[in-house]
Image: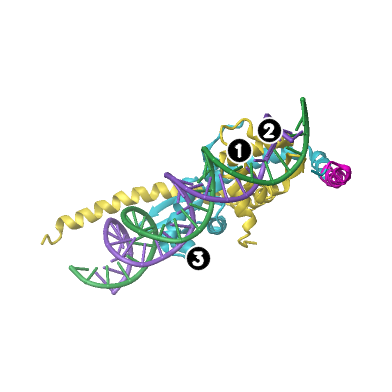
Chain colours: A cyan, B yellow, C purple, D green
Amino acid sequence: MAEPDPRLDRIFFALSDPTRRAIVGRLAGRPSTVGELAQPFSISAPAISKHMKILEGAGLIRRRVEGRRHHCTLDPRALEAAQDWLSYHRDFWEARLDELESFLEESDKSSQQRSETTQRKGSKRMKGTTP
Amino acid sequence: MAEPDPRLDRIFFALSDPTRRAIVGRLAGRPSTVGELAQPFSISAPAISKHMKILEGAGLIRRRVEGRRHHCTLDPRALEAAQDWLSYHRDFWEARLDELESFLEESDKSSQQRSETTQRKGSKRMKGTTP
DNA sequence: CCCATAGTTAACCCGTTGGTTAACTAAAAG
DNA sequence: CTTTTAGTTAACCAACGGGTTAACTATGGG
């Protein structure tokens, strides 16, 4: 239940780039060719080609070559895999929202204690041996 | 509804590394110090420190410095942000699962067509002018 | 005061990313 | 056959990621 899973590496990495997320976004609307997908971006065709390969390698998109056009579609199963990981870990933690609260309270307390401690240390030093 | 959002860049990127996902996994159980989190990994302390900074920069963890210990806790809101993005795009697409089916059918059809086309071209060439 | 502990910062190495331009393959159209 | 059009591959570059070791800060305990 916590195996490294390199597939998630690729999925999350693919989604960490804004251009690639935008491509997925356009693809969520309707299947498109690589050229159509590239149109709104002001980067070169080879750059798009690389992005597509990363998305494909992550299993996020599927490609159907038809003549000289490459038709692409989203494969929601990869998104689902990422979602499952997130759900698992978030749900796990949300069941302990009280702990986050107390954690934040402790943060306040400790910063108060910190200044008190500094004070105490200060007074000790005041009396202390000054070599 | 499709702004670049650099925060998602950092969240997804942070989650693209197996060590960092494992750290989040341990943190989903209970808050821990950096040292406790580092214990199961066979990498150096500075390496862990960098991972923590990336997770913190992505807003995935919060840190409370108490004496010389750094207590860390998960901030589920960052996970939620990632989940929201995924949900939005997946739901959008799942409403069109039929399109994925037809896409895959087309894949089969086009591979058949491809061989037919190749055949036709072949026969044309057979009759054609051979310089 | 001295030493161990918890953690970060600095400097460095090497592999990878994201972008470029140039050259290439392959299909469509003239 | 010639030229567009769609897209990829190759070679290159600056920047960055993940790891290291060495040095540093700062708290805690004898």
Element carrying mark 2? helix
- The residue shown at (71%, 36%) is B33
Element carrying mark 1? helix
Q: Is residue B9 left or right of residue A104?
A: left
Q: Which numbered tag is attached to residue B36? A: 2
Tell me the kind of residue under disc 2.
Glu
Tell me the kind of residue under disc 1.
Ala
Q: Which numbered tag is attached to residue B19? A: none
Marks 3/2 same chain? no
In front: mark 2 or mark 1? Answer: 1
Marks 2/1 same chain? yes
Quadrant (top left/top right/bottom left/bottom right) for the C terminus of chain B:
bottom left
Q: Which numbered tag is attached to residue B45? A: 1
In front: mark 3 or mark 2? Answer: 2
Q: Is residue A107 visible?
A: yes
Indicate whether residue B123 is drawn in magenta.
Answer: no
The reply to whether the C-beta atoms of the residues labelled 3 and 2 are less than 8 Å apart is no
Mark 3 to mark 1: distance in Å? 41 Å
Indicate whether residue A118 is drawn in magenta.
Answer: yes
Which chain's residue wears label 3?
A
Q: Which residues are magenta?
A: A105-129
- The residue shown at (86%, 46%) is A122
| Residue B51: image location, x then y, percent | 61, 43
Marks 3/1 same chain? no
User: Between residues A24 and C17, which one lies in front from this camera angle?
Assistant: C17
| Residue D1: image location, x then y, percent | 18, 68
Q: Mark 2 Cα within 10 Å, few/some/many (few <14, many 20+)? A: few
In front: mark 3 or mark 1? Answer: 1
| Residue B84: image location, x then y, percent | 67, 51
